[in-house]
Amino acid sequence: MRQHPSGPSLPSLNLPSLSLLAASLYASALLTSSCAHNQPGLESSSAHNQPGLESSSAQDQPGLGSSSGGGLGSGLLRVGGDEREFSYYVPESRRVGRMPVVIYLHGHGDNMRHMTGKGLVSSPSSVWMEVAEAESFLVLYPLGAKGPGRRGKTGWNDCRLDAEGNPDLDDIAFMRQLIQFAAESLNADPSRVYVTGMSNGGHMAMRVGMEMSAEVAAVAPVVALLPSDGGGCAAPSRPVPILMMHGTEDPLAPFDGGSMANGRGEVMSAQETVDTWVEWNGLGDVPVQTIELPDLDPDDHSRIIQRTRERSGGGAAVVALEMRGAGHTEPSRSEKLGRLLRGIQGEQNRDIEMAEVIWAFFSGRSNP
């Protein structure tokens, strides 16, 4: 085994081969949305030339202390010999005392502008800031490292050993330093740290749940599956609450398992991934509760089946949302993907707001 370097409220959620042309069009859409070279503090390829990002430590930057006002900020952390970029959102509505923190991990090739809703492409991940404002918690948006090669894309060193294009930096160390920064400078509660992500970011969220099980309160991977060969990560040392979302028509990470598109590795099926987490969380003897969520948008060609395993006294639940008819997309009612992206990634479920549903799962959970 490889050793890695160190919407509506839903009552049921009180949860006890892309073609080269299509891939090129998608990349063009994201690049267009970044407008990188003229945007300070976000997607420039050289952080040293960005205003406010000269420091190698976020704690040394003005405006990043616990007394800072609300809104979106950015900074750098030095992890080993590498500078790692992140943005963070502090709610104007923040309450007295320490706040929960959600870490959102983007998909392969994404950028900061798109993640935070400042690009031209719809951004379900940006809704996290609206939910944070309403519920008073922090959001961290770290940026992945560039993968190998001159055209390497931003991404995460997740558990897959056979995923072409993943970087090889110490992303677990990055997560730990982010949590430390949030606790020391943004008044985050270390016992209420939650990690979610999409695609490559979802794979990384699962790695965090496996390798940092004592440091996070829950994880929520979206359109991500466990490696079919077990990958380079060990099972978690303790049960971790997890919510998963996956589309049955995903063209990149096949719902039934097998080879991911573009050489991104071999993965288990969605059911095998769920079953593995059920075993890890000790829920094999707990019956499944199955419900069909309301079809609030009949035009999205998608329905959601929710399956929950959780003991009556609470604990480390396993919740799976099967997005029937949906592709490699994040569900959202407010951030609707256009026809171009749907043609590449598949349909988008528009019956739920991803950030709201995941927060309903996270909220109230804490490390034991």
Image: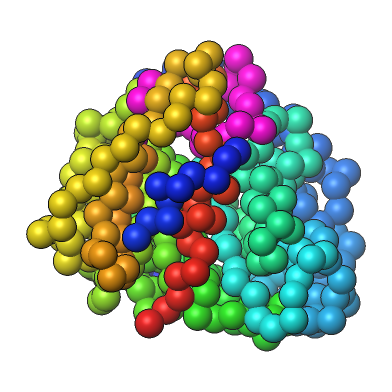
Quarter of the image containing the C terminus? bottom left
Q: At x 46% / y 24%, what residue is drawn?
A: 295
Q: Relative to 5, is 141 on the left or the right?
A: right
Quick check: can you spot residue 31?
yes
- Residue 326 is a magenta residue: yes
**Going by the image, does 346 lie left or right of 37?**
left
| Start-end of magenta stretch | 322-341
User: Which residue appears at 85% of the width and 75% of the height?
Assistant: 68
From the viewer's perspective, is 52 left or right of 150? Answer: right
Residue 110, x across and y down, in percent: 60, 42
Q: Main secondary structure of the magenta part?
A: loop
Residue 87 x/y as whole percent? 71, 60
> In which quadrant of the rendered view does residue 144 lie?
bottom right
Is residue 23 in view?
no
Picture quadrant where residue 223 is located: top left
| 203 horizontally vs 317: left or right | right
Q: How is the image coloured?
A: rainbow
Position of the N terminus, as image quadrant, is: bottom left
Q: Nearer the viewer, residue 16 or 335?
A: 16
Magenta-colored stretch includes residue 272: no
Q: Residue at x 87, y 71 (%)?
A: 69
